[in-house]
Image (cartoon, helix red, strand yellow):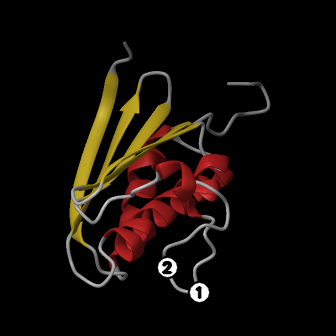
Amino acid sequence: MLNVINKMSIKLESRSVNEGFARQTVAAFIAQLDPTMEELGDIKTVVSEAVTNAIVHGYRDRLGYITVSVRLFENRSAEIKVKDAGCGIPDIEQARQPMFTTGDEQRSGMGFTIMESFTDKLRVRSTVGKGTIVTLVKTIHGRRTEEGQ
């Protein structure tokens, strides 16, 4: 069992303006692991996708709350959880297929595909009528000097 070295959690309304706040907050928290710019970009992207999914698909046309939590482990991995109490996902396997969306024609249906490609592990748990928890895990290798330190 890995030791948690630090953790944080924020709760925000499911307003689209809060997606950027969640993305920047998680990036600032993970910065303590001294990630590369690419790793930081990946983290921002997956948080943005997960929070946007909760806003657009989880709550659709109503407001609710989204909780974003991060745990940092001694092996330099970060676990990010995005939780909502929205409508839930009836078929997770179908929802994870590229190009599938329950949104309008402006939605690409690539959210889970993007999250999966930018992380080491993606887990989705959902109950119809109760909400969804998306768990993303990424190891932060960090910037290295030329001497390999």
Q: Nearer the viewer, residue 88 or 140?
A: 88
Q: Is residue 117 left or right of residue 71?
A: right
Q: Residue at x 29, y 85 (%)?
A: 61
Q: Quadrant of the N terminus?
A: top left
Badge 1 element: loop
Q: Residue at x 40, y 76 (%)?
A: 56
Whole-angstrom CA distance, mark 2 to mark 1, is 8 Å
Q: Amino acid at mark 1?
A: Gln
Indicate the position of residue 8 as horizontal and vertical percent values: 26, 46
Amino acid type assigned to the residue bearing label 2 in the image = Gly
Q: Residue at x 40, y 27 (%)?
A: 73
**Does residue 21 show up?**
no
What's the mark number on residue 21?
Answer: none
C-beta proximity under 8 Å, tags 2 and 1: yes
What residue is shown with label 1?
A: 106
Q: In the rendered view, does 61 fall on the left or right side of 147?
A: left
Picture coordinates of residue 30, whole percent (x, y): 44, 46
Q: Which residue is mark 2?
A: 103
